[in-house]
Every structure is written in structure tokens, then in C-alpha cells.
Image (cartoon, rainbow, N blue to C red):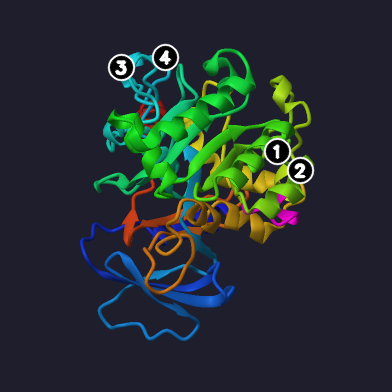
Amino acid sequence: MKAGRAMALMLALLPMPVAAETVAIVNGQIHSLSPRGVIEKGTVLIRDDRIVAVGDNVAVPADARIVDAKGQPVTPGLFSAYSQLGLVEVETVASTQDQSAPDAPFAAGFDVRYGINPASTIIPTARIEGVTRGAIFPMAGKSIFGGIGALIQTGDGAAALFRPGALLLVELGSAGAQAAGGARGAAWITLEEALRTAPTAEGPDGEALRALLAGKLPMVAHVERASDIEQLIAFAGRHPAIRIVIMGGSEGWMVADRIAAAKIPVIVDSYANLPLAFETMAATQENAARLAKAGVTIAIAPLNRFTAGAPHDARLVAQYAGNAVGNGLPWAEALKAVTLNPAIIFGVADRLGSIEPGKLADLVIWQGDPLEIGDGPAAVFVAGRQETLESRQTQLAKRYKALSSPRE
């Protein structure tokens, strides 16, 4: 019965090819992530790429296309706070990888925007799971600086690049120590010296570091160990103009109050539970819950920096949020950690992350609980356009299912 109802809902929500139009999503349980909270039997009115009205008493224009949510949850589109969508197609094929340039004559100035492939077959696999935006990260090579990341949207047929110059990645844990010559002290001295000389430095590296000093983009620092986090907090005190984000922070729960006091957000992997390295000896799946309880702004993402599948894991955002709920994070906070909070962290909360008039219409209608593995999207809207729920994998499944059917 449940499968039948889910199929009926999905059939009712099949996307239609549209250009500019007015759409009314009606009869939805609207998780607005705004001061209005959850709106039962609510309506979201979309015109072109924007939300124009939200509520339980919205006047629907006569020319609007009606999409009946059938009482199911409607949330903002999911925002993967860490991914390499469009940068890596096949990890074992070098010609399909554009996330790192270890032999380039620059490091901080390496910019992923030029390598993003909007036709990547990996992007639809994230979109059909409700991911409408993603932060695209470089990877560090022989320097502590990984380079400049970007934000993308996952809509089919649209320009993927949403915001270039969205972040600067810096390695300041074990990886940074190795890149700087073998010790953490060398990594920190390298960073401080680069910032000291940035005002007169030439080339892409100088430009990137000046943008960082001017607060035009955040410095996302990959650190895991509690002592490294404390060093980063001290660095923030010395450089108040630099916006800092922690990525990883496996031992962040040990210094959660200090992180909260410093107002530094954390991108956390809710599955991190094993001492995969000496810097993650105190990792726990309760990290997200403990950080949030202390008042830290968290985003949840599949970091998986030690696994081969990392570039393909943006599709698992909802699953990771659900895992955090299972380990003590309140459900509403988990939803924020994959919608509104990433938008806040990357400075686009004025356009994304909640269901409010004036914001981009990134929306997902769900078959059930958004954070349950078995309850996927029934409909996905990216900037007001209803997307097809197909990927190369679903197309292949249909193809070979048809081939395996008995012939008459």
C-alpha cells in the first residue's frame, strides 16, 4: 500500500517542460525554516525562479499550474556543504579530474570554476535525491592551500555555476603539516607569512589571499584535532577580518563552547566515528549534536575524505542528516544543517535556504520523512523549474529491466 501511494504521488508530480511560468504547490506540509515555522496544508506560489507567496491562505492565480503535494513535506532544496560535483567523473581516470593541480605554479589561486562540467552524469544523481545546490571544493596538493571553490546549482540545462569565488580551502591539520614540510608549526608559519606578504604579492595566489583578507570569501580550514581547532580559534582572534569555517572538526565536541564563543561554523561529517588517523582519535557520531547544543552553526555533509567515493557522495546529504538525528541532533536542526545553515555559511542566505517570498524557488516535495533513506523526493524544483527525477543510473536500470523482461 505504501509503495502504491508513493507511486501515485510521483505520477501526479511528473515534471512538465516549462520556461517561465507560475506554479502553485498546494496542500503541502511546508517546512519554511523561517519565523513562520511549519505550515500545515500550506501553499507555495512560484513565479519564474522566485517564491512570491507562502502560507495557508494564499490566493492562487487562475493561470497557475497546480502541483498537489498531497499533505507531504515540502522543504527547501538540500544544499551539500561539501562536494566535487562536476569536477570528478571517474576517480581512476585522470582526464576526468579537475579538483586539484599539485604541479601548477600557484596554489591559493587555483580556481575550480573553470573545471566544472555542467553535463557531468554525477550531478543528476544528487539532484534526484533533493540536492539543488552544492559547495564545490578543490583538493590541496603540495601546498597547504587547496584553492578557490564555487557554488553550483544542479538544475538540468542551466548554467551550473551559481557563485564563483565562494571559499578558499586551507589544510591545517595532518595534511597541512605534511604539505608544509612535516610539522604543524610549518603549516601555520606558511599561512601567516602568505597573509603578511599578500598585499604586494603578484599573480593568482596574491589575488586570492587579498580577497580573503578583505572578507570577500571565507577561509575553510580543514582541521580535525581539538588542539588544531584551538590554534584556529587563536588565529581568528589575530585576524578578525577573515571569515573562518571549520571543515571536519571530528574532535570539535571537545572544545564546542570555545567554537561557539568564536562564532565559527563547522561543516561536519555525521558518520565520522572511527580513528582513521591520529587526529581523529576522539571522533564520535554525536559530534554534530554536541556542537549544535553548544550553539555552533553546523552544516552536515558527506566529507569522506579518506574514501574513494567522496566525489559522488553529495547525493547522501539527507541520509547523513538523518544519521545525526539518530545520534542526538533534533530533527529540525538536522534539516537546517542541510538547507539554511550551508546558505548562511557561504553567504547566500538572502537567496536560499528557506521558503520565503523573494528567495529562489529551490524546493523539494517528499514522499515521506525527508531524512529517512526510504522516503525520497517526489518532486524537485531548482530555481522554479521542476526537474526530471532521472539520472544515467535510472535510465540504465530501465533499459536493462526491459531487456530482462520475458519475451512473448
Displayed quadrant of residue 36: bottom right
Gap in angstroms between the C-alphas marked 4 and 1: 37 Å
Gap in angstroms between the C-alphas marked 3 and 2: 41 Å
Q: Which residue position is annotated with label 1? A: 230
Query: Callout 4 environment at 10 Å: few (<14), some (14 to 19), or many (20+)?
Result: few
Q: Which residue position is annotated with label 2? A: 255
In the image, is 348 to the left or to the right of 64? right
Q: Nearer the viewer, residue 215 or 14?
A: 215
What span is in magenta? Answer: 290-297
**Judging from the image, what secondary structure is the residue with disc 1 in?**
helix
Amino acid type, residue under disc 2 in the picture: Val
Q: Which residue position is annotated with label 4? A: 92
Q: Judge depth for marks 4 and 1 and give the one in front.
A: 1
Q: Judge depth for marks 4 and 2 and give the one in front.
A: 2
Horizontal and vertical percent position of residue 117: 29, 33
Cβ–Cβ below 8 Å for labels 2 and 1? yes
- The residue that appears at 63% across and 49% down in the rendered structure is 372
Horizontal and vertical percent position of residue 104: 33, 18
Amino acid type, residue under disc 1 in the picture: Glu
Q: Judge depth for marks 3 and 1 and give the one in front.
A: 1
Answer with mark 4 or mark 2, whichever residue precedes in sequence.
4
**Judging from the image, what secondary structure is the residue with disc 2 in?**
helix
* Figure check: 360 above or below 171: below
Q: Judge depth for marks 3 and 2 and give the one in front.
A: 2
